[in-house]
Amino acid sequence: MIDNAVYLDHNATAPLRPDAAEAMRAALAVVGNPSSVHGHGRRARRWIEDAREAVAALAGVAPAGVVFTGGGSEANALALSGLGASPRLCSAVEHDSVHRWVSPEGHVAVDHEGVLDLDALARALAKATGPGLLSLMLANNETGVLQPVAEATALAHAAGWTVHCDAAQAPGRLWPLTLAALGVDLLTVSAHKLGGPAGVGALLVTGGLTLSPLVRGGGQERGRRAGTENLVGIAGFGAAAAAVCAEGAAEPFRLAALRDRLEAGIRARAPEAVIHGAAVARLPNTTCVGLPETAPAADMQVMRLDLAGVSVGSGSACSSGKVTGSHVLGAMGLAEAAARRAIRVSLGWSTTEADVDRFLEVWAPVAAG
């Protein structure tokens, strides 16, 4: 069943790209610690640095600014902890790996579409006891809604604050993606969201910004993350990043066409369905669809679709398998009952028109109850 299943949960994790798998197989044969100065070590180091250049190209930064980590959550933790105990603010719809570093009073409100309230941010900045760190995601993992990162960054910088952006969902879905255009100081990317392996990510750091390491020990990653680098994972990350850059704007365009096909089909089959965040700019691959209270709850929808061989998501995938009410939809003003009837369909590099059509075929009776 799994071999023939339709996979539409790319925002949780994307299938491993063939380029990444090939690079990882080759890297498995590399002997040597990247920190060693002998020939074997230098060869291993070359693999790391080639991957660093490919990941840097995702956001147009200098390779020296790429800090490899054990994933997107660790990159977020490094950004949120690296400046010490300074004040922190974030949006009310951030990923839990950001939310848990910021006190509830620092969660800035969003509107009913899930977009950061810039006036509320301005008030929070004015009220803060001193300059600190603002963390604002580029695109929401549940709804795909894009945040006004450049505008928020301008407000924060004017108040003397540093800005971090969790962009884990953006590569391969937004093009171009440049740190300079966003204006942020720190940016998180994650390998497994774009077709690389799980367990590796990166924090991109602008020149001159000093962070206290979260993992201490050796001097790896220019003293910003200790521990021998995950050569195989980083090689796969680099290959996946290079594939995303080679696709350029073509892949977001393709995904947008597939998403439009999906949402047209949803509306035709269930006019009462709501596409959350549809009125504002979103990722081209993400559809968060809610149903009325007479419909099955999201966990039941996910299970019934799974039995039909279609995998979709419900809320964040980083909750140890728990299906709970979405804090994202709650922050958008949805009642708990409505939030519990929303599922997420997220497309990616492996998605085809046939996959979309199969989803619609099996979803229609599920939506009807």
Image (cartoon, rainbow, N blue to C red):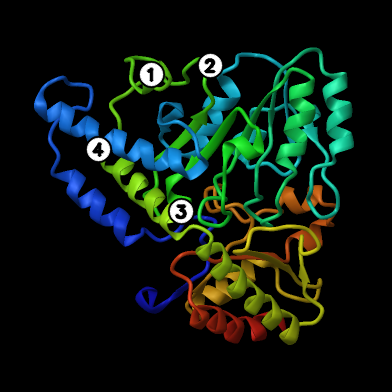
Q: Mark 2 packing: few (<14 Cα in 10 Å), some, or many (20+)?
A: few
Q: How many marks?
A: 4
Instruction: Name the kind of residue labelled 4 in the image.
Output: Trp
Residue at image point 33% right, 20% down: 220
On the image, the x and y values in percent for residue 325 come to: 71, 54
Side (left or right) of 252 relative to 36 = right
Nearer to us in this view, 333 or 211: 211
Nearer to us in this view, 85 or 327: 85
Residue 96 sits in which quadrant? top right
- Which image quarter holds the C terminus? bottom right
Q: Mark 1 packing: few (<14 Cα in 10 Å), some, or many (20+)?
A: few
Residue under pointer 3: 194
Which label is found at residue 222? 1
User: How much space separates mark 2 and mark 4, taking CA atoms?
Assistant: 25 Å
* Discs 3/4, front: 4
Kind of element beneath mark 3 = loop
Side (left or right) of 24 relative to 195 = left
Which label is found at residue 301? none
On the image, the x and y values in percent for residue 259 come to: 62, 71
User: How much space separates mark 2 and mark 1, taking CA atoms?
Assistant: 13 Å
Q: Is residue 369 visible?
A: no
Residue under pointer 4: 47
Residue at image point 77% right, 64% down: 278
In the rendered structure, which disc, 3 or 4, sits on the residue that comes first in sequence?
4
Instruction: Name the kind of residue labelled 2 in the image.
Output: Gly
Instruction: Name the kind of residue labelled 1 in the image.
Output: Arg
In the rendered structure, which disc, 3 or 1, sits on the residue that comes first in sequence?
3
In the rendered structure, which disc, 2 or 1, sits on the residue that comes first in sequence?
2
Which label is found at residue 208? 2
Residue at image point 53% right, 37% down: 188
In the rendered structure, which disc, 2 or 3, sits on the residue that comes first in sequence?
3
User: How much space separates mark 3 and mark 4, taking CA atoms?
Assistant: 19 Å
